[in-house]
Image (cartoon, helix red, strand yellow):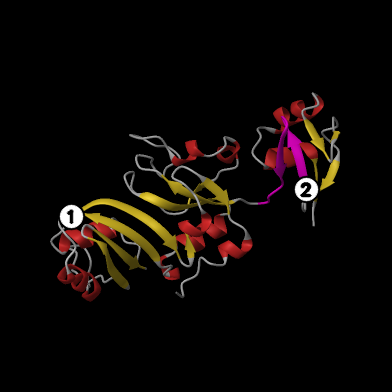
Amino acid sequence: MSKLSLDLILKSQGFGTRKWCRQLISEGDVSIAGETVTDPRAVFETTGLAFTLFDELWVYREHVYIALNKPANYECSRKPSHHPGVLSLLPEQFTWRDVQPVGRLDHDTTGMLLMSDDGTFIHAQSSPKRHVPKIYVATTFDPVTPELVEQLLAGVKLHDEPAKLAALTCRKLDEHQLEILLEQGKYHQVKRMLAAAGNHCTALRRSAMGKLTLDALGLKEGEWCYLDEAQRALLVSDM
């Protein structure tokens, strides 16, 4: 349990500088339990705290854990260069509280992207030692054949890798689409594995991480949601 002054609470939630948050409070833009609070120094218990700012309800979160169904042509960067950044799909205050992508998806790759302002969580999820399985749906230029699936399961050699990389599972979905489960997380791994196997990836979507799936979250492209503790527990290495 912790207690903070209201101005610090608003600042911690990404609503601007402490000076700006004090102004919002003093001007009567913040209410708690239906009562307007105009004293920036008023202290509140943060656990379970809900407050209203500009008639929108917010719940205090020490850290945010977010799943985004990333659309194509968005960059996983806080300083995008050629396409809009994924942070533009989130409320502005997430930028203020230093939310950042957990790992990266190529600008043309869609699907599940985790985001957070918790450095420990970001490091844990990004670490190659975690071996968190990830499921991708790949659309191929040439038809998916049994031989292609067998190659991906047996392993293919990439020019900058010392050993072959193999899919944990791989199955044909339709004539030009397959589902592949990986745990290595190498650079452009699905695209490069398909190329090494003699095919070409024309579209790629990440549908799951660990046991957490986009279908279960019910997110359309461009939509996001907070992840609760139970959902974060699904981001595990055992499948």
Tell which tag, 1 or 2, sits nearer the viewer.
Answer: 1
Packing grade of label 2 (10 A; few <14, some 14-19, many >=20) is some
The verdict on residue 124 being magenta is no
Quarter of the rendering occupied by the N terminus: bottom right
Q: Residue at x 46, y 46 (%)?
A: 220
Q: Secondary structure at mark 1?
A: loop
In the displayed structure image, the side of residue 173 where residue 228 appears, left or right: right
Which percent across, then down, holds residue 27?
79, 23
Q: Is residue 38 above or below residue 239?
A: above
**What segment is highlighted magenta in the picture?**
49-62
Q: Are marks 1 and 2 in contact (CB under 8 Å)?
A: no
Q: Residue at x 70, y 42 (%)?
A: 58
In the displayed structure image, the side of residue 156 where residue 102 appears, left or right: right
Which percent across, then down, holds residue 5?
81, 41
Residue that mark 1 sits on: 200
Q: How many marks?
A: 2
Quarter of the rendering occupied by the C terminus: bottom left
Q: Which mark is residue 11?
A: none
Which percent across, then down, holds residue 21?
72, 31
Residue that mark 2 sits on: 49
Amino acid identity at mark 1: His
